[in-house]
Amino acid sequence: MHTDTHPGGASGTGGPVQGTPPDDALPDALPDALTDALTGALRTGPFHLALRTAVRRRGLALHRIRHHLAEQGLQVSVTSLSYWQRGERVPARPESVQVIRALEHILDIAPGALLRLLEPTRGGATGTTTRAACRYQELIGSDTAVLHLLDQLDCPTEDRLHTVSQSEQVHLGPRRELWRREVQQLVRAHRGNVDRYVSIYQGDPGCDITRVRIDPLDNCRLGRVRGDQSASLLAVELVFDRPLSLGETQPFRYRVTDGTGGECTEYTRGFRYPVGHYLLQVYFAPPTLPVRCYGFTRRSAHAPRHHVTPIPLNGYHSAHLTEQDASPGIVGLAWEWD
């Protein structure tokens, strides 16, 4: 098994993470920068980032927003507004449509701009919703080794970045081992002053984590690296050329070379927030080819597989899966050798 999840970026260079500002904090960037950030967030989402950016640009504390809503006969608690802009919950009640429309007016944004970002999660006529952000512990389960590595990097488990889109190429070697993977990623900052992305790599049983190589390829450089040999874990900082402001995006690319582990039978990727587009391609080394491949999702680390779908192996000895507007959780591709 192989898993790669990400907790997000830390602020600062080599020092402690700055404290999280309160939810009703006023804007931490220039108005023009916040307007640009809001334009991007309204275009690509997710909802909570667009709402948070709009609140900061408008300069209203959450209790003032609650007061404006109450004047229109709409009762929403400050706690609910806080959850919405942190991505921990999404507006799901039938009356939420009226609330969101009122928020668009209060926050001085185009009618329907926020509501549109909720449409993929409202479930159409059924009224069901997909999940908002999941906690990092849901992705890793009870694996305290991961949390210990993140502590060594002064990295919080709440994301300061989310993935807008991601493409991965995974290559297996002739011993059925995971040999190499290359990642192209586009992230957006949830907060200002974020200058790095932290990637967690977990090798297969028998992996020698001291021999795993990380190569930054584009728009990033290698920062601190921490490993846990007993857990086959590696935590890696990929540092950007400058801190990102709220809502700003950053593309980057990197490669992980391993080849030290035993037989690999699946590859999974965890996301805390909805992701616009994800593509995973797995390449096998002939003549050692799997007899079948299938994609799946999981809500959390120890949850059962859902949406198990057969995936054909093509003429280039590879299989791929793609997810559009994927919900938070785990996406994976598995295969059977015999």
Image (cartoon, helix red, strand yellow):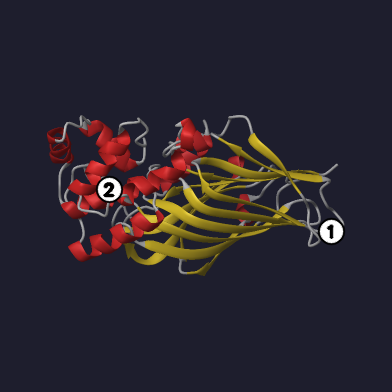
The residue carrying pointer 1 sits among few (fewer than 14), some (14 to 19) or many (20 or more) residues within 10 Å by Cα, namely few
The residue carrying pointer 2 sits among few (fewer than 14), some (14 to 19) or many (20 or more) residues within 10 Å by Cα, namely many
Residue at the (42%, 46%) spot, across then down: 152
Which residue bears the numbered disc 1?
286
Give the side of residue 277 with respect to residue 89, left or right: right
Helix, strand or loop status at disc 2: helix
Residue 109 lies in what quarter of the image? bottom left
Give the side of residue 255 with respect to residue 24, left or right: right
Compare residues 328 and 210 and report the one nearer the observer.
Answer: 328
Residue 297 at what x, y percent from top left? 60, 39
Helix, strand or loop status at disc 1: loop
- The residues bearing labels 1 and 2 have C-alpha atoms spaced at a distance of 50 Å
Residue 131 at what x, y percent from top left? 45, 36
Residue 72 at what x, y percent from top left? 15, 35
Residue at the (37%, 33%) spot, across then down: 92
Give the side of residue 194 with respect to residue 126, left or right: left
| Above-or-below relation of 224 to 79 | below
- Which part of the image, by quadrant, shows the C terminus? top right
Residue 13 at what x, y percent from top left? 34, 59
Q: Which mark is residue 52?
A: 2
Q: Earlier in the sequence, mark 1 or mark 2?
A: 2
Residue at the (67%, 59%) spot, across then down: 180
Compare residues 133 and 180 and report the one nearer the observer.
Answer: 133
Asked whether residue 27 appears in the rendered view, the answer is no
Amino acid found under the numbered disc labelled 1: Pro
Amino acid found under the numbered disc labelled 2: Arg
| Above-or-below relation of 64 to 257 | above
| Above-or-below relation of 126 to 216 | above
